[in-house]
């Protein structure tokens, strides 16, 4: 058993239906930690590029290589620019996006792209990062990012369409990976120290991945 578990014997029991939307959000971002950050670049039908960070982000599976990120609706229930651009063609988008991984030295640039600009204004220009032509998709990737996943949108799952803060799960198949050569070896193992990725905590908090430990899986984890 975990040490000191007896200290936590008294627990709140919460019904999400009785909480406000901001209260639910604060619980999610404070309890699901740390969260990796998807720095997503997209392009509009008119060719305007967009770059925005999302910390509801995860891998889905390796066959096919798939990931997801979750842009919530705006306060008026409308779609954020990233979703407008990345949703499938049959829904009015271009159906493509790039997830750029965020190391510590790009943290402030990433945070700067959360600034609410007008549709079509470039976050690349705002924070001073470089759009680079992608290999398989139309949206540019961030040249300064050490890992870029070029994706084609498979599906958007909407949990509350048209509602303020309604969730949207964007599923994308990775069709090309661009990765700094020094980061990965011949067995496709990534060097976490060199990557120096950051994660999102609650509120305005972030963390680094510099402190790590290893342990075996399964029963061996209980005895070693």
Image: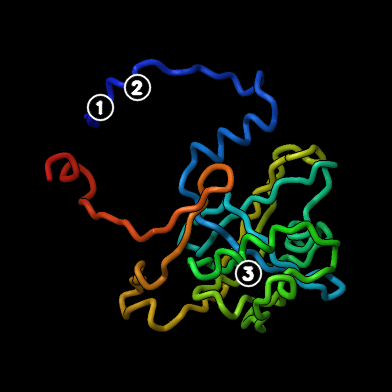
Question: For numbered disc 2, what is the local secondary structure?
Answer: helix
Between the C-alphas of marks 3 and 1, the distance is 43 Å
Residue 94 position within the rendered picture, expressed as x and y whole percent measured from the top left: 77, 67
Between the C-alphas of marks 2 and 1, the distance is 8 Å
Name the outermost residue toward the left: 223
Residues tagged 2 and 1 counted as in contact (Cβ below 8 A): yes
Residue to which mark 3 is pinned: 98
Between label 3 and label 1, give the one nearer the viewer.
Answer: 1
Residue to which mark 1 is pinned: 4
User: Circle 2: is it few (<14), some (14-19), or many (20+) Cα within 10 Å?
Assistant: few
Residue 66 position within the rendered picture, expressed as x and y whole percent measured from the top left: 53, 61
Question: In the picture, residue 167 is in which quadrant?
Answer: top right
Question: For numbered disc 3, what is the local secondary structure?
Answer: strand
Q: Is residue 48 left or right of residue 52?
A: right
Residue 159 position within the rendered picture, expressed as x and y whole percent measured from the top left: 70, 39
Q: Please identify the quadrant where the N terminus is shown.
A: top left
Residue to which mark 2 is pinned: 8
Of residues 182 and 30, the one nearer the viewer is 30
Residues tagged 3 and 1 counted as in contact (Cβ below 8 A): no
Of residues 115 and 132, the one nearer the viewer is 115
Between the C-alphas of marks 3 and 2, the distance is 42 Å
Mark 3 and mark 1 lie on one chain; the one further toward the N terminus is 1
With respect to residue 98, does 83 lie above or below?
A: above
Q: Residue at x 53, y 66 (%)?
A: 102
Question: In the picture, residue 80 is in which quadrant?
Answer: bottom right
Residues tagged 3 and 2 counted as in contact (Cβ below 8 A): no
Between label 3 and label 2, give the one nearer the viewer.
Answer: 2
Is any atom of residue 161 visible in this view? yes
Q: Residue at x 27, y 20 (%)?
A: 6
Q: Which mark is residue 30?
A: none
Mark 3 and mark 2 lie on one chain; the one further toward the N terminus is 2
With respect to residue 36, does 16 lie above or below?
A: above
């Amino acid at each position: 058993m975990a040490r000191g578990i007896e200290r936590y014997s008294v627990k709140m029991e919460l019904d999400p239906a009785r909480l406000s939307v901001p209260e639910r959000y604060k619980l999610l971002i404070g309890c699901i930690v740390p969260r990796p950050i998807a720095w997503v670049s997209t392009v509009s039908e008119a060719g305007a590029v967009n770059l925005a960070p999302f910390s509801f982000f995860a891998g889905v599976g390796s066959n096919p290589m798939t990931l997801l990120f979750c842009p919530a609706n705006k306060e008026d229930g409308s779609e954020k620019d990233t979703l407008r651009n990345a949703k499938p063609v049959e829904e009015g988008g271009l159906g493509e996006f790039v997830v750029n991984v965020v190391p510590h030295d790009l943290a402030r640039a990433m945070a700067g792209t959360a600034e609410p600009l007008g549709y079509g204004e470039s976050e690349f220009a705002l924070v001073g990062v470089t759009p680079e032509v992608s290999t398989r998709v139309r949206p540019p990737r961030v040249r300064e990012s050490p890992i870029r996943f070029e994706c084609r949108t498979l599906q958007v799952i909407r949990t509350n369409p048209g509602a303020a803060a309604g969730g949207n799960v964007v599923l994308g198949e990775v069709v090309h990976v661009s990765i700094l050569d020094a980061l990965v070896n011949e067995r496709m193992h990534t060097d976490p120290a060199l990557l120096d990725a950051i994660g999102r905590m609650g509120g305005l908090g972030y963390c680094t991945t510099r402190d790590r430990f290893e342990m075996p899986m399964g029963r061996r984890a209980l005895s070693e």
